[in-house]
Amino acid sequence: MEEKGQLKRTVIDTTAGLIAGGISRTVTSPLDVIKIRFQVQLEPTTSWALVRRNLSEPSKYTGMFQATRDIFREEGLRGFWRGNVPALLMVMPYTAIQFTVLHKLKTFAAGSSKTEDHIHLSPYLSYVSGALAGCAATVGSYPFDLLRTLLASQGEPKVYPNMRSALVEIVKNRGFRGLYAGLSPTLVEIIPYAGLQFGTYDTFKRWTMAWNRYRSFNINPHGREDGLSSFQLFLCGIAAGTCAKLVCHPLDVVKKRFQVEGLQRHPRYGKPVEHRAYSNMYDALRRILQMEGWAGLYKGIVPSTVKAAPAGAVTFVAYEYTSDWLESRLT
């Protein structure tokens, strides 16, 4: 009976994670495309930086609104969803693995598979569970993340017409190990990112529940109301996603550089990242800092932060509601 309950819980977590990940990725794809274009651009991404560094060569993208306008003019609306197929193939198993592993770890730590018991776990266990779940999900879905970056970073004319051609080019130039280029900085990034995202989400939920209890007690001393509304879950998701992204963004830039290094890119989008431009993660951080300054490590931070808030919120709200709906249907 217990095994049947665990299997049902795994099905609920996996399915809810798949749906939540797919919805979140599709909704926020335009911001992700702009972010990737900024991150792989070696030239400055602001007009101010061009003037300050006295550079004569123009940059393709020099601001979020300018990038939005140019992508729409040159590629149409479809340009904002470039690479969305591998993105969905990446994010759906990623989110499914992440939430499934997360629930297993929390069940082990709490000694109970009930979600309501997990809210009482210490913040440290929430952080560790989130980090380990993020690592497992990253390894399981990484090749699709790489393909997503490659397709989203190209504009018009296309260098890679579809996912298959990009895959063939990567394997031909780098071998099968090339499908995991940039995995090291990704894992180093995902540990604090996933830990912060899930840890702060649980913390914000706990604070909000305490606030609800305080409010309900003032209104009715004999009543107790600590449930969270969909809007409160949304705000907790926004706060969690934003905190995690601000801390971990430089490692995301490094990851993107490793993913596209040595691969073709149309000259109108600036210089390509040369093959073996960086020997390792620390060398990449040092070189970017040396050549592009601190601003180089935070290229794409504006669309990334704008995206992180709704992405985190949509993912958590969609997961919570889908999970509750599936649980009610399967019981």
Image (cartoon, grey):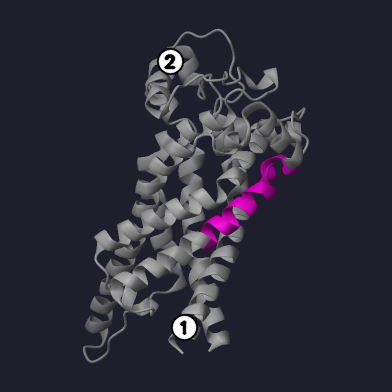
Q: Position of residue 95 (x, y in %)?
A: 52, 59
Q: Give the residue number, with chain letter if any, for mark 1.
A: 3
Using the rendered view, name the quadrant where residue 166 is placed.
top right
The structure residue drawn at horizontal position 45% and vertical position 41%, both measured from the top left corner, is 186
SS majority, magenta:
helix
Q: Which amino acid, by three-letter code, is at mark 1? A: Glu
Q: Which secondary structure lies at badge 2?
A: helix
- Depth check: 290 or 175 in front? 175
Q: Give the residue number, with chain letter if any, for mark 2.
A: 291
Q: Which amino acid, by three-letter code, is at mark 2? A: Met
Contact (Cβ within 8 Å) of mark 1 with mark 2: no
The structure residue drawn at horizontal position 33% and vertical position 71%, both measured from the top left corner, is 108
Q: Identify the mark nearer the N-term, 1 or 2.
A: 1
Q: Position of residue 19 (x, y in %)?
A: 60, 65
Compared to residue 227, the image places residue 45 above or below, namely: above
Q: Closer to us: mark 1 or mark 2?
A: 1
Circle 1 residues within 10 Å: few <14, some 14–19, many ≥20: few
In the image, the segment drawn in magenta is 76-96
Furthest-bottom residue in this view: 222
- Depth check: 232 or 174 in front? 174
